[in-house]
Image (cartoon, rainbow, N blue to C red):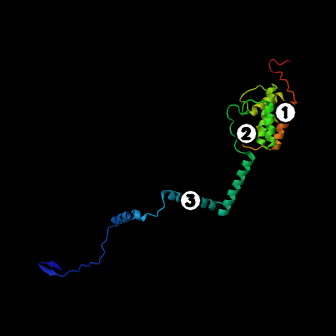
Amino acid sequence: MRATGGTITAGPPIRDDVPVETPRVPAREAAERELSKPMYHENDPNLLQRGLDRFWEWVGSIFDAASAAAPGGLLGLLVIFLVVLAVIGALWWRLGTPRRTPTTGDSLFAEGPRTAAEHRAAAARHASAGRWNQAVQERMRAIVRSLEERTVLDPRPGRTADEAAAEAGRSLPAHADELRSAARTFDDVTYGGRTADEAAYRRVEELDVSLERTKPALDLSSPGTPA
């Protein structure tokens, strides 16, 4: 009904079934508030699980990209990976672990002063038990201690095997190469992580025996040496 100039006229009827339109922004905010309630997130993964999921997705994307670039796809990538592992293993077996820098102090004689005979006895015990690393070490110490006892070398704390070999080689030139080789074997098993065998020990042992029968050469350039 509608009033016009005092006259009531009939208008269009008001319908109750027409839906009420809610503005878009308030509707979205209401939905976000509703979905933020804890009851909707009881079964969600925790922070650690979500982090792991993201990590594995990242790893998977890397493998997918690598397999797409590698010839043969995923199988080709696997073959390349195995080849790289084989190369690393071969280098490790050939070169051993990286050599540490020798520490300061007495790097040749790990314990207190002992005679050459005591070092030889210790080397023999290790050799009889198959402990070739320790046998090589003790035999090299026996060589250096014997040269000190014979005054071929001056006793000096902190001397390394390389230094002893270089100094002794000047007085025993016929054995200079063997001395350097024995010192290198000592360094390899002591600092380089290498493993000695019986053959390596026997070479050092033979050098020790040979040096015992060798007279040092006179160094005429040294002051006080009789001409």
Residue 115 screen position, x and y as percent: 78, 30
Determine which residue is flagged by label 2: 190
Among the two numbered marks 1 and 3 on one chain, the one whose residue lies closer to the N terminus: 3
**Disc assigned to residue 56:** 3
At 85% across and 37% down in the image, what residue appears?
A: 206
Q: Nearer the viewer's eye, disc 3 or disc 2?
A: 2
User: What amino acid does circle 3 point to?
Assistant: Trp
Query: The C terminus appears in which quarter of the rendering?
Result: top right
Location of residue 138 (image quadrant)? top right
Q: What element carries label 1?
A: helix
When asked about the image quadrant of residue 134, the answer is top right
- Of the numbered discs in the image, which one, if any, rests on residue 38? none
Q: Which amino acid does label 2 sit on?
A: Thr
Q: Can the viewer see residue 207?
A: yes
Q: Residue 175 carries which label?
A: 1
Q: Position of residue 205 (x, y in %)?
A: 83, 37
